[in-house]
Image (cartoon, grey):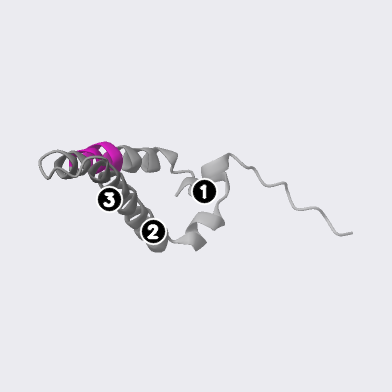
Amino acid sequence: AVGAGWQWLVAYINLGCYYGVGIPVGYMIAFPLRRGIQGMWGGMLTGVGLQTVILIAITMRTDWNKEVSDPGLTVGFQPRAKRDKS
């Protein structure tokens, strides 16, 4: 997704997975279940795993032929005019 110019989307997914899922899950495992640092690591790994699954799903569902067909959409690239072969 980052290579397609969707850094904003990846940033939101990252924030949601770490702060919305990873930290709460880590807290629940670490303190109420009394697992300590193992719980915090478990929460962070849960957040990373969820982030990975979401980004793989986005990558698999992307129409890459459409993305490649217009390079100017993502990087501001303007192709040169075709040269005469004479």
**Disc nearer the start of the sequence (2/3):** 3
Earlier in the chain: of badge 1 and badge 3, it is 1
Q: Which numbered disc, 2 or 1, marks the residue that appears first in the sequence?
A: 1
Q: Say if the magenta span includes residue 34.
A: no
Magenta: predominant secondary structure element? Answer: helix
Badge number at residue 56: 2
Which element carries disc 3, helix, strand or loop? helix
Image quadrant in which you'd find residue 28: top left
For residue 61, side relative to residue 47 (left or right): right
Q: Which residue is mark 3?
A: 46
The one of 85 and 37 positioned closer to us in this rendering: 37
Amino acid type, residue under disc 2 in the picture: Ile
* x, y percent for residue 57: 35, 59
Quadrant where the C terminus lies? bottom right
Is residue 33 rendered to the left or right of residue 56? left
Amino acid on which disc 1 is placed: Gly
Q: CA distance from mark 2 to mark 1?
A: 13 Å
Query: Would residue 20 be found to the left or right of residue 69 on screen?
Result: left
Which residues are the magenta region?
16-24
Residue 76 quadrant: top right
